[in-house]
Amino acid sequence: MNKEKKASIIANIKQYAGSSSVIVITDFKEMPVEELNALRVELRRAGGRFLVVKNTLARLALSEGDHNSLSSHFKENCGLVFGFEDPVAAVKAVVDFTKNSKFLKIRIASLNGQLLSEEKVVALSKLPSREALLSSALGTLNQIPTGFVSLFANMIRSLLYGLKAIEEQKSK
């Protein structure tokens, strides 16, 4: 591989790392190509990407930036999972895939520069997705004005019942 090709790969990894909030280093020793392609498809659906790269090139690409703590964890065959849009969705896709695969193993991850062990990656995958969290927050925010309107409606209703009772009492 010539220097220009290596520089291009390093630039590509840097670009992916710069726009991803999570990077997971995986072991995929002896993984069949069909299974590897299925993993790539699942990750694309989850807003992620899977790359198989040379360790030295990955080390050079990730030596600076948010995910530089991963630089010392490259050995043997490893693949990089990048989570771009929703880090939980990408991690969830990888963890779900490891449950059905004999070959794919999670080694370590970096979430916004913080190292995560395999156990922490599995715990992260159990969190609700970004959309679920947003809908939950929106539902909570929606309850505040709904409760406020309901409170005032009950106050006005009680006032009207009281006025109606006074009117009936005076008309007798």
Image (cartoon, rainbow, N blue to C red):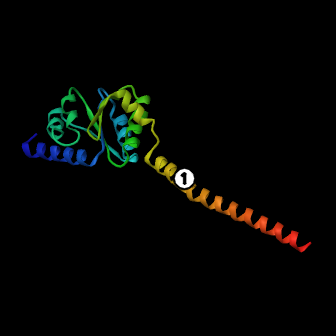
Front residue (pair 101, 96): 96
Query: At which x and y percent is residue 115?
Result: 28, 33
Q: Amino acid at mark 1?
A: Gly
Query: At which x and y percent is residue 66?
Result: 22, 42
Q: Which residue sits at x=38%, y=27%?
A: 119
Q: Residue furthest bottom?
A: 171
Query: At which x and y percent is residue 19?
Result: 26, 49
Q: Residue furthest front?
A: 170
Front residue (pair 161, 89): 161
Residue position for label 1? 139
For the residue carrying disc 1, how many other residues have a C-alpha within 10 Å: few (<14), some (14-19), or many (20+)?
A: few
Q: Which residue sits at x=34%, y=36%?
A: 36
| Location of residue 100 (image quadrant) | top left
Relative to 85, 155 lies left or right: right
Asked whether residue 125 is in view, the answer is yes
- Is label 1 in a helix, a strand or a loop? helix
Split into 4 quadrants, where in the image is the C terminus?
A: bottom right
Split into 4 quadrants, where in the image is the N terminus?
A: top left
Q: Which residue sits at x=29%, y=46%?
A: 20
Query: At which x and y percent is residue 46?
Result: 40, 45
Relative to 77, 103 lies left or right: right
Q: Residue furthest right?
A: 172
Q: Is residue 9 above or below residue 102?
A: below
Asked whether residue 24 is in view, the answer is no
Front residue (pair 3, 11): 11
Q: Residue furthest left?
A: 3
